[in-house]
Amino acid sequence: MKSTFLKALFAPALILPVVFVACHDEDKIEVSGVKLNTTYNTISLGDNLTLKANIYPENADNKSVKWQCDETYLHNNGSGNFLGIKAGVTTIYVITNDGGFKDSCKVIITELPLENPTKNIDIKDEKLRELLVNDRSINTDGDEGISRAEATLVKSLDISGQGISSFDELNNFIFLEELNCSNNSITSLDLSKLKNLRVLRCSNTQLTQLDISQNTELSTLVCNKNSIDTLDIRNNKKLEDLFCGSQTNTLNLELTVNQFNTVWEKNGSDADKNNVKILMNIFENASIKTDILSAPLKNGGSMTVNPTNTHFNFSILDNEGKELSFFDKTILQKIVWTSSDERVIAIHTQEEQEGNMNSLSLSAWIKAYGTAIIKGTFNDEYSISFTVNVE
């Protein structure tokens, strides 16, 4: 009897929590969507950006969200607050904890404040203006022009073969990574602000000069069939593909030893190299290695030898400390080696081949006591030397 009474007493307590939970779930108001207060924004380095997420419906129970971004460009301070730390274009995402609904905002971070970001660019070439305005991936607001903010969102642009005669407004597209403007009548390109440019195709455009010294991310350059006098690629360390031949005049191509052995060698056909003259300082940051010294000599250095030795061997190391070599052996054959006093030191040279690479082995023959300067000269322009004291 007692047991039955107790069961009856506690039964409601066991049932009530279950009923309560069920009632709570039925009353919960779930999230149905989220919307940011802006779809894109422009800030400069060091600036703060605050976004607001509007949760729908407004009386939803769980309004908590997560913020995500590429922290290469933005520091995420939480609660929709961000700090610009690197120039570029990136995207901020907001995601609701309830339901996983998502919205995004594209953000432009410039090195300097972008003046009048909503003002349309004055594009002089009418064909170019029409082409850009009719491209809704560029003209995002669908008006009659391209604003500075819209230009900064463009990463790839193909305007080849459109009869365009000028693109003076190119530097407004500061985050452009790929540009193809080939087969037009453009005579000049200002690329100085395009720090992210990786691919440039501008062949057959009537260019007379091309400055890519500021485009250090450039990996592909196609600029053949123009009238360019000089092209300096020494600052373009990431360049892998280069096609610059068939100019209407002789192109003076300035490049490094490493670029000659890699970039230039890879551009196989002779047609790619028509009317191209190579300008290259093969001794830039080079050093001299001998078989009687443990450490290489810097250009202009000196060494002392014992006259009991009949000779010593030496070679040239490039700027990376590797033996100077070329896929084209005629480069090394152009080096003229001299001794300032052949009564003390005389020079002998001998070519060595390893596969397709060629290097040069040199011997200095010791003849008498005294001092002599050994000097190598390339194309009558660049030289390397070291002093030998015979004591």
Image (cartoon, helix red, strand yellow):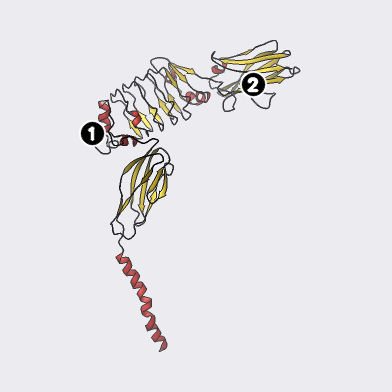
Q: Is residue 52 left or right of residue 300?
A: left
Q: Amino acid at mark 2?
A: Gly
- Distance, label 1 to label 2, CA atoms, is 66 Å
What x and y, as percent, mark residue 235?
47, 26
Judge from the rendering whether residue 289 lies leftward or rightward of residue 159; answer left or right.
right
In the picture, measured across the screen, residue 70 lies left or right of residue 370, that is left
Q: Quadrant of residue 215?
A: top left
As drawn, is 362 to the left or to the right of 329?
right
Q: Position of residue 94 (x, y in %)?
A: 36, 50
Q: Residue at x 28, y 57 (%)?
A: 58
41 or 20: nearer the viewer: 41
Residue 30, position as x, y percentages in the image: 31, 60
Label pair 1/2, CB-CB below 8 angstroms: no
Q: Secondary structure at mark 2?
A: loop
Of residues 175 and 258, which is closer to you in this image?
A: 175
* Residue with the mark numbered 2: 301
133 versus 24 height, above or below: above
Residue 170, x across and y down, in percent: 34, 28
First in sequence, mark 1 or 2: give its number.
1
- Name the residue beneath numbered marker 1: 144
Q: Extreme right residue here? A: 308
Residue that appears at 38% across and 35% down: 112
Question: Badge 1: how crowded within 10 Å, few (<14), some, or many (20+)?
Answer: few
Label disc, if present, on residue 266 of the rendered structure: none
Number of numbered markers: 2
Q: Quadrant of residue 310?
A: top right
Query: What amino acid type is highlighted by mark number 1?
Result: Glu
Going 37% across and 49% down the picture, which residue do you hit? 80
Q: Residue furthest left?
A: 144
